[in-house]
Amino acid sequence: MGFGLPWALAGLVAVAIPILAHLLRRQKLPQQTLPTIAFLHRIHATRAARLRFVDILLLAARVAIVAALALAAAAPFRVVQSSLLDRQHALAIVFDDSLSMAAMDDGETLIERAASVSAKHLRKLPEGSEVSVVLAGQPPRVWVRRRSEIDMIERAFGEIEVRSTRAGALCDAVQSAVELLLESDLSDRRLLVLSDFTPGSGADECDWPDRGIRVAFEAVVTSDPDNRRIASVEVSGERNAPDGLTLDIVVTGAATEVPQSVRLRRKGQEALRTPVRWSANQGEASVAIPPGTPDAVVELRLDPDDVLPADNVRGVLLGSDTVHVLLVDGDPHPDPRRRETAFINHALGVAPRIGRAFAVETLDAQDFSESAIIRSDVVVLANATLDEKWLPLIQRFVGGGGSLWITAGDRINPRVYGSVLRELLPGRFTATRVEERPISLQSRSLPELDQATITARTPISELSLDAVVTARFADGAPAMVEHRYRNGRVAMLATTIDDAWTDLPYQPVFVPFVLDALERLAGRTQHVVDPYAPVSLPGSTSTQRIQVVTPSGRTVDLAEADRVAFRDTGEIGAYRVLVNGVDGDRFAFVVDAPAAESNLESQGPPAEPSDAAGAAGDRSRGTEQPLAPWLFLGAVGLLFAELWLRQIRRR
Amino acid sequence: MTRVLQPELAVRLAGLTLRAKRTVDGLLAGMHRSPHRGASAIFKEHRAYRPGDDPRLIDWRAYARSDRYTIKHFEHETQLRGTLALDISPSMRWGSHDVSKADYAATLLAAIAYVLTRQGDAVSLITFDDAIRDRLPARSGPAHLDYLMRLLAQPSPSTGATALHVSLDKLIEHAGRMGLVVIASDLLDLSEGALDPVARIQARGHETVVLHVMDPAELELPYEQPMRFEGLEGEAHVEVDPQGIRRRYRDAIDGFLESCQRRVVAAGAHYMLARTDVPPEHILLQLLRGG
């Protein structure tokens, strides 16, 4: 027996109110003389004894009502210290299936052992008990929802992935389990948590139910928590540089007597092996990749395996952070140095290597094709005469997350752009105008743009509602306009990107102007994801077949769509994306093992409250059954009794 | 007149007379028939002369016509002796409004005395509780009436509870024979034979009127709150919720009134309930008009 709000017990003083009222009422009864009092005596004589009894009952009822309400306000509860398995109850099992539970011990994973422990509990459950199972790997999943068929639940335990790579989400799972218990009609509610209680579980930070639900913890731990992990890989150098790339690898964990090595795997095949040098609790290794490697991603694997093999693997991206720019020159100048593409190439070439690298591919307009643009992040249509057959390519490219930059020039036909690409464009090109006097540019982010002068332009009008003007002419007309189209972005420049209509390419501000525009249009690409996190990829089309090759070598064909969310990311390691069977570097990604899950040292279940009276081997706090509803019910009953007694008294 | 008989009431009573329905016995000639035949203006009957009859009563004219001695009887008008009995027990001094039952009864008796005195009858008065407290002999005349009024207004203090059977038995001795007896009381003597003396009064040839004086609060118990009720004649107090027992109380009071009326009427007397919230003239008019 306990009280949730013990200070409310002070309300018990209020029981004095009916007693005092009773006494004061007796003392302060008005007096009245009456000659015919003999008749009152005659009547009263037959009622007096009964009235005294009724009065006592009335007083008792009123005192009891006040006491019941005061006690109910104190939120009393009764702690039922019965055995976990003694009677029908609602049981929610929070089953930790995070990566750390995939640790091997005595020939089985901890998940398998936890399933066995759960099965033992299930077999001892009284008939009619209700069981829910919530898996505590990220994201938490309700595996079994309030079922009583023990056989079915046991089978469900057998279907849990025993080599999980998930991060821990124990607290969220506990919340889900508590919600399931509260849905149950059974009043005896119990929560059983099966976990290794490693630091990655975060059990100490969970909000454990402190009333109405009996909580029990079952620690499932490995006897050998010695685990190593490839903690980090730093890539230095360039793929095409003479020295190639160098991978500096750091391994955490204790050194072992058995020599450790790191194997480098390319496309599923072992390519290199290097030993791990240990110092204190950290191992180091270095792998050199020769120049010219075509791989966008490789995989490192620590050898030999330890108790948790999953975190011995790590995928490494070899340049996927590069922005791929496809320059489509619509009016190739006889002098290669004065082509539009030459100016952009030049600007990107002199750009400092800070942040992203740019890989530029130049293409004449007649060579424009899907295979050319699928590998690109940004396509620049420089003074290109629009061909209607490009429309589906461009739509799919931009819809799938690519970006398009259209720059003006004398080959631009505003009417064709307006009719063919109107839906994609942030505005409409109008007739080209030659300025009587050169006009300058203005930009808040690049004030130096005012150094450039413009002699001709193809004005942009009818801006879309979401269009953003990033640069204007001195007369206020938009010079550079951008907007988002589905998953990609589209930008329009009202003048040339070469020196035909402007001296901008010769101005120092040209380099940051181009870099800003391309970086903004390229956006950010997520190349490192958590296990089971979705990755946005372009879908297959009639002419492009997109496939994902998982770390285990499994090939997954993507569906036909502009963009798909690839969710089959449960394996740790490097994922390659094939475009028509060829590596599409820009889409390669890796899945890393959750770092917190590599520490297998169990911290034990959360601390018990000091007043918890747990049974041996059962660290439960007992079920607290709230008594307030019963007290309220009793008070209502007493109230009716009081009314009834008053009626009796009057009769 | 004193406060027991207001002038307005006296004026309204001026045209009324109180006629006894039974023959009365008195010394002075009044307006009531006497059981004694004799000199009077009112012829009653003829009868045959019997030896011993006064020869002066022989109707000689009838003898001349019928040749038989015939005695001629005349009604003997006599003076009425009215005996008024006022209950002055503590219970009579109670009233739920500004008039106590004793005041109300005194008014009624004063009015009756006034009427009787005006028509030349003799009126006596006694007050009683558990015994006779005041005793005023029968007299007629304004001076006696004035004295009677003062006694009604200020009777002797009461010292005991109502004891009807004792007091009324004493009244019999005081009232003499064949007169009018008016008893004003709340009759709150609940002993078994309390009203038995009424029959004995009747047996003495009196015409008896019992004015049962009750306060409306006694009849209806109009109180709402639980109260501590106190008695006036030494009864123990009682705490009751009037709302809870009102219906039973009224039944008991109705039974009491019915019992009193039944016993009084059974004795051959007149019973009249006099509620103190009813104007006294209503009661008097009902009484004086023989209602």
Image: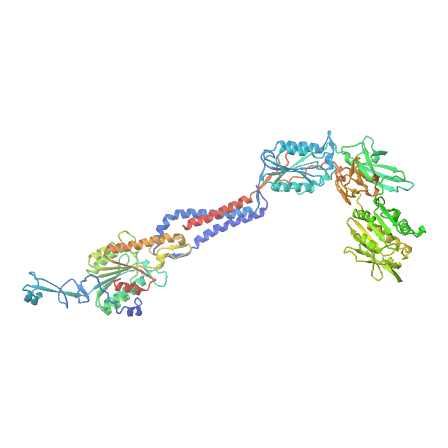
Residue furthest to the top in view is A107
- The answer to which image quadrant residue A600 occupies is top right
Q: Name which residue lies at 31% across and 70% down.
A: B8
Residue A119: quarter of image: top right
Q: Quadrant of residue B278?
A: bottom left
In this orientation, which residue lies closer to the viewer: A519 or A559? A559
Q: In the rendered view, tell whether residue A628 sits above or below residue A114.
A: below
Residue A649 image position (x, y, % from top left): 42, 49
**Foreground pick, B194 / A164:** A164
* Quadrant (top left/top right/bottom left/bottom right) for the N terminus of chain B: bottom left
Where is residue A237 shown, x and y percent of the image?
88, 42
Residue A423 position, x and y percent, is 78, 52
Residue A253 in sight from this viewpoint: no
Judging depth in this view, the residue of A61 and A115 nearest the camera is: A115
In the image, what residue occupies the spot 55% across and 48% down?
A10
Residue B212 or residue A512, whichever sits in front: A512
